[in-house]
Amino acid sequence: MTLSGIGYDSHRLAAGRRLVIGGVEIPHELGLDGHSDSDVLAHAVIDALLGAAGLGDIGEHFPDTDERWRDADSIELLEAVVAMVGGRGLKVVNVDCTVIMEAPKLAPHRRAIRERLAEAVGLEIDRVNVKATTGERMGFIGRGEGVAALAVAGLADAR
Ligand code: MG
């Protein structure tokens, strides 16, 4: 049996914040605003895993009203979710995701992001795909106001 889940997240770009995408800090004059490190890609992957396992969503498990998660390293949250999934007798079999961002270019960081995510979910790098596109200068992404990410995850019985 295999299970699939989807995830989506977006965060506003702001001055004085770090731009962390998939656990990799990318040099840029703006970063992602929010309660945790606001790693938009890690959050989308978390929701995809929770969705596949039938475990709700990121806001239920790590509410942004909880001081425990202030400036949280979202890769650690992702690792906690992988453990939760494992507790349900399931293992992650693949992750595919898309980052939608006008600037900077993601391509130079794609390999590092894949490695970081693969390590966090316990997969070989070829089972973790990372794609990037822009908003074609349309909407909040195209105007550089924010970044969005989509993810799909597959789970199978751990046995
Ligand atoms: Mg988020």
Image (cartoon, rainbow, N blue to C red):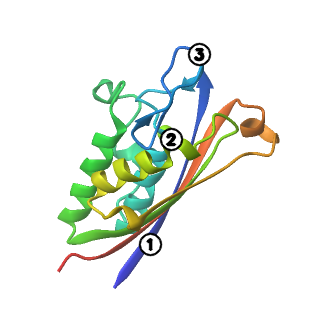
- Residue sitting nearer the eye, 61 or 93: 93
As helix, strand or loop, the secondary structure at mark 1 comes to: strand
Which residue does the numbered mark 3 point to in the structure image?
Answer: 15
The vertical placement of 145 against 133, above or below, is above
Q: Earlier in the sequence, mark 3 or mark 2?
A: 3
Residue projecting furthest to the front: 108
What residue is rendered at 50% in x and 31% in y? 26
Drawn side of residue 154 relative to residue 136, left or right: left
> Marks 3/2: CA distance?
16 Å
What residue is rendered at 18% in x and 63% in y? 87
| Amino acid type of the residue tagged 1 in the rendering | Ser
Which residue does the numbered mark 2 point to in the structure image?
Answer: 40
| Amino acid type of the residue tagged 2 in the rendering | Val
Which is in the foreground here, disc 1 or disc 3?
3
What residue is rendered at 44% in x and 72% in y? 4
Which residue does the numbered mark 1 point to in the structure image?
Answer: 4
